[in-house]
Image (tube, grey):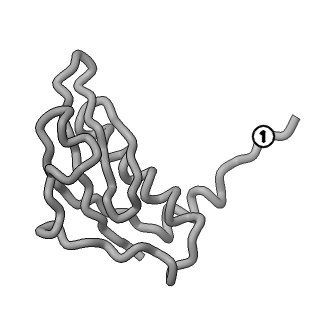
Amino acid sequence: MTIAYPVIFTQTNDEKDTYLVYIPDMDGATEGYGLADAIHMAREYIGCTLYSKEEKDYPVPSKLTDIDPASGEFHDAGKSIVSAVDIDVTEYCKRLDNAPVRRN
């Protein structure tokens, strides 16, 4: 099952090219260094959040047009854009379930 959530990316213009990431439908935040890393971190945040829930309890994704970049948690830290980040929840859960466990 693939699902996409709107995400607000705020570029801080620092030396690390940090992007602050806010996921309004989950009221969650993360960050990444560069846009590609920020998208990856948003996908990981969404995946981890959905992994612990049943499908019927997943937050309903908002429409992209309903999200105002200025409404983000980091709106005053730099220029913000809204984009959708998708994740295949089934594949993500399989990957986490099959992760090796180290036992000493």
Picture quarter with the C terminus: top right
**Above or below, comparing residue 69 to residue 97 in the picture:** above
Residue 75, located in which quarter of the rendered image? top left
Where in the figure is residue 102, as x and y percent of width and height? 78, 40
Residue furthest out toward the top: 15
Where in the figure is residue 56, as x and y percent of width and height? 50, 83
> Residue visible at 46% across and 75% down?
58
Q: Which residue is mark 1?
A: 102
- Left or right: 73 as drawn, with respect to 93: left
**Above or below, comparing residue 82 to residue 30 in the picture:** below
> Residue visible at 47% across and 59% down?
47
> Residue visible at 31% across and 49% down?
22
Residue 25, located in which quarter of the rendered image? bottom left
Nearer to the camera, 63 or 89: 63
Query: Amino acid under label 1?
Result: Arg
Where in the figure is residue 94, as x and y percent of width and height? 58, 64
- Left or right: 87 as drawn, with respect to 9: right
**Above or below, comparing residue 19 to residue 40 in the picture:** above
- Left or right: 95 as drawn, with respect to 38: right
Residue 64, located in which quarter of the rendered image? bottom left
Q: Residues within 10 Å of mark 1 (few under 14, many from 20)?
A: few
Picture quarter with the N terminus: bottom left
Where in the figure is residue 87, as x and y percent of width and height? 38, 63
Q: How many marks?
A: 1
For numbered disc 1, what is the local secondary structure?
A: loop
Residue furthest out toward the bottom: 56
> Residue visible at 31% across and 59% down?
24
